[in-house]
Amino acid sequence: KAKSTPPGEWIVCTPVGEPHYFIRRSYQDLLERRLPDRWTLDRASEAHPVMIEAWAPKIPNAVAFNSAALRALGLTAFTPDRVADVDLEKDEKGDLTGILRGPVTNYYTFDPYWGQILTKLPKPTAETAIAGTLAELGRYTAQGVTTIYEAHVMEPEHVALYRHLRNDGALAMRVMATFDVESASLYPFDALTSKQFDERLRQLGGQAMELDDDLFRLNGLTLSPGGPCFSGYFATYEPYLNPFGRKTRGVRLLSLEKEEAFVRYCAENGIRANICVG
């Protein structure tokens, strides 16, 4: 990958193991039982910032950066060993190893420190998003899967990507999708006002039904008021321990007023309503 990437551009690698919960296989199953440190990754490339991602919802998790990535993010030996719930591993000399642990996932994380790091990381380009989607669809069809349902964290640009693949003749399996009216999965999350929510609900509601095509269809709307219990974000009446041993009742990401408005709108307009919690 380093040979085909211009110097200075990020190389972001997928996690080690089996997503998304990494129960059967993870980086801990490597011979070294750990992710490669900055010096090991430097052997792959010193000319590019390199990162091995951590995928939600497994928390605590771990990421790995090479030296160029640490410099790009402004992380140095002077950075404290722990900021918020993020642990920055250091060697016996006090130098960063490039390993960060904690709520360091690519989404479903609201840690303020890790969130600031996330905002400095590169966003997927249209080119990489299309290539990644086609590669994943290819893996599905190779296993005999002929249909997928995309109903969570689906922004208009994600729906547009599938529409592009369909119009381009590149969609080789059936896809049914919905718009997520308001998703808090990605950082930073800034809740819509009631007026903004109502406007977006009606805007997306007008596009929520496309059932004529054999390969690509839209059917319904989604609302995601809660997060996974795995990360400590599932809202409950009784307290439970979050991944860091603190009592929590989880997080209500969207208000009850928004939930009611969503359900009423879908019922009144004959729209299939999806509620994603946990």
Image: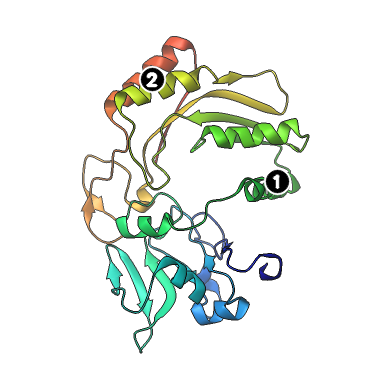
Residue 90 as seen in the image, left or right of residue 246: right
- The picture places residue 142, in percent across and down from the top left corner, at 75, 48
Q: Tell me which residue sits at (69%, 18%) in the image.
A: 212
Q: Residues within 10 Å of mark 2 (few under 14, many from 20)?
A: some
Q: Is residue 70 shown left or right of residue 260?
A: right
Q: Kindly indicate the quadrant of the structure image that contains residue 77.
A: bottom left
C-alpha gap between disc 2 and disc 1: 34 Å
Quarter in which the C terminus is drawn: top left
57 and 185: which is toward the camera: 185
CB within 8 Å, label 2 to label 1: no
Please give the count of numbered marks on the rendered protein: 2
What residue is at 49 percent from the left and 19 percent from the top?
Answer: 205
Q: Where is residue 31? Give x, y as percent.
A: 56, 79
Where is residue 106 drawn, in percent x and y? 46, 54
Locate residue 89: give its quadrant. bottom left
Q: Nearer the viewer, residue 30 or 74?
A: 74
Amino acid identity at mark 2: Val
For residue 263, which numbered disc appears in the image? Answer: 2
User: From the viewer's perspective, is residue 39 above or below residue 100?
Assistant: below
Residue type marked 1: Leu
Locate the N terminus and report the quarter of the image it occupies. Answer: bottom right
Residue 134 numbered mark, or none = 1
Closer to the eye: label 2 or 1: 1
